[in-house]
Amino acid sequence: MFQNLTLSPSLNALRAFEAVARTGRVTLAADELHVTHSAVSRQVKALEQSLGVRLFEGPKHRLQLTAAGRELAPALSAAFDQIADAVRRVGEDGEDLHVAVNASISVKWLIPRLAAFQAAHPRIRLQLAELAPHAIAHRGAQAVVRIVPTSRLAEPNVTPFIRNALGPVMSPALAARIGPDPLRAPRLAAQTHPEGWPVWAELAGVELPPAPERPFAHVHFAMDAALAGLGAAILSWPLAAEEVQAGRLLAPLGFRRSGSAFAILTAPGAESRPLSRFRDWLVAEGAKTPPPP
């Protein structure tokens, strides 16, 4: 497949390509590697020139891997994972645990519960990193926590811990202002989950009427805006459960089961005692989540 190998590709070029292939975005790869996005683009282009093949195709905002890219990416990911794992094992005593988590799950669900995990497992030093919105792996992480489609739940490295449900929520004050039709409220839209409102509308079998829309960078920002009475947000039930039960948020149209679940995805070859303890704890915590209204 790969020809014209006059010079060995640089390690930086290989890292840049692997990061773009894994995260799906040049900007996300640049953030992970702590370089500019133009530097990542240059490294990928240099790798393509070195190999004599195209690795990506399509417009810059929607890059797709070519056949050569699909062949190279998983091999590089596995190799870099092995390097990260070897470095971690040499420098640690085996009780550190590195987990990458989607930001909103981390802020609104995981971190508020971590004191209980640390109390139960004081020797495990849990280190959290932010997982890019659409990434399913993170460099150096033994596992990632994110929402995954139910079609992936049978995979051996995927362990679900809460079945997901979606619903619109708003503050009691906003509900009182807008009257009996909650869909008239301004819509708070998370840029990391832009499909939230359309997916819920399809699940609920309703057509969304015209309404002003206010964008926010993350789901947890939209959730805080809903608590402040700025509009209605589509939230996953596990993130909203405590606020709804406490009456700080209302769910006038209830929640609808979606085709997804909160899950932990284990990196290849990363199994360890701390990871097993953390995974078991996630499943136990998830079992405490009450059913959605």
Image (cartoon, grey):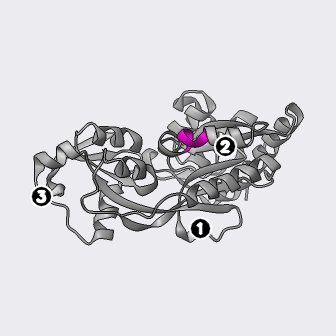
Q: Main secondary structure of the magenta part?
A: helix
- Depth check: 8 or 138 in front? 138
Name the residue type under label 2: Phe
Tell me the number on the disc at residue 152: 1
**Among the two numbered marks 2 and 3 on one chain, the one whose residue lies closer to the N terminus:** 2
The answer for how far apart the CA atoms under marks 2 and 3 are is 42 Å
Mark 1 or mark 3: which is in front?
3
Q: Secondary structure at mark 1?
A: helix
Tell me the number on the disc at residue 180: 3
Q: Quadrant of the N terminus?
A: bottom right
In the image, is residue 2 part of the stretch drawn in magenta? Answer: no
Instruction: Estimate the x, y position of residue 69 in percent, counting from the top left.
Output: 64, 54
| In the image, farthest residue toward the front | 246
Q: Quadrant of residue 214?
A: top left
Q: Residue at x 30, y 63 (%)?
A: 254
Range drawn in magenta: 110-114
Q: Name the residue that disc number 2 marks.
A: 117
- Depth check: 111 or 137 in front? 111
Instruction: Estimate the x, y position of residue 5 in percent, counting from the top left.
Output: 77, 46
